[in-house]
Image: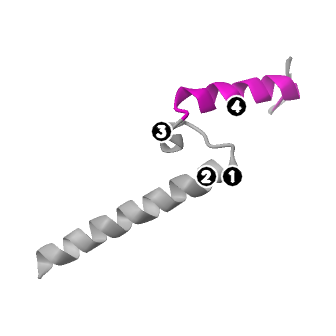
Amino acid sequence: MVKVFGDMVTMHDLLRDVGREVVCKASPKEPGKRTRIWNQKDAWNVLEQQKVRAQCIHESIVMRIF
């Protein structure tokens, strides 16, 4: 059940959990492609991948300069 109180929206915990599962199943192996990340492990995974990707881009730019 979803309730609206003025500018605040609330929903039942089970409805929230089902929504989270739907998002997770949209891209189960690649959390970086999801619209939202709810799991701490997935969040760290995505951040680490972005860090590595950014470092590779930075190193390739530096190598092109020299």
Q: Residue under circle 4?
A: 20
Q: Quadrant of residue 12?
A: top right
Task: State how far apart marks 4 and 3 are (Cα).
Answer: 14 Å
Sequence-wise first label, 4 or 1: 4
Q: Residue under circle 3?
A: 33
Q: Is residue 26 left or right of residue 9?
A: left
What is the secondary structure assignment of the residue under circle 3? helix
Q: Which mark is residue 43?
A: 2
Furthest residue toward bottom: 66
Residue at 75% x, 24% y: name it. Answer: 18
Task: State how far apart marks 3 and 2 are (Cα).
Answer: 12 Å
Task: State how far apart marks 2 and 4 are (Cα).
Answer: 14 Å
Q: Which residues are magenta?
A: 9-28
Residue 5 seen in render: no
Sequence-wise first label, 3 or 2: 3
For residue 59, above or below residue 5: below
Furthest residue toward top: 1
Sequence-wise first label, 4 or 3: 4
Q: Residue under circle 1?
A: 40
Q: Nearer the viewer, residue 9 or 66?
A: 66
Q: Amino acid at mark 2?
A: Ala
Residue at 69% x, 52% y: name it. Answer: 40
Q: Residues within 10 Å of mark 4 (few under 14, many from 20)?
A: some
What is the secondary structure assignment of the residue under circle 4? helix
Q: Quadrant of residue 17?
A: top right
Q: Amino acid at mark 3?
A: Lys
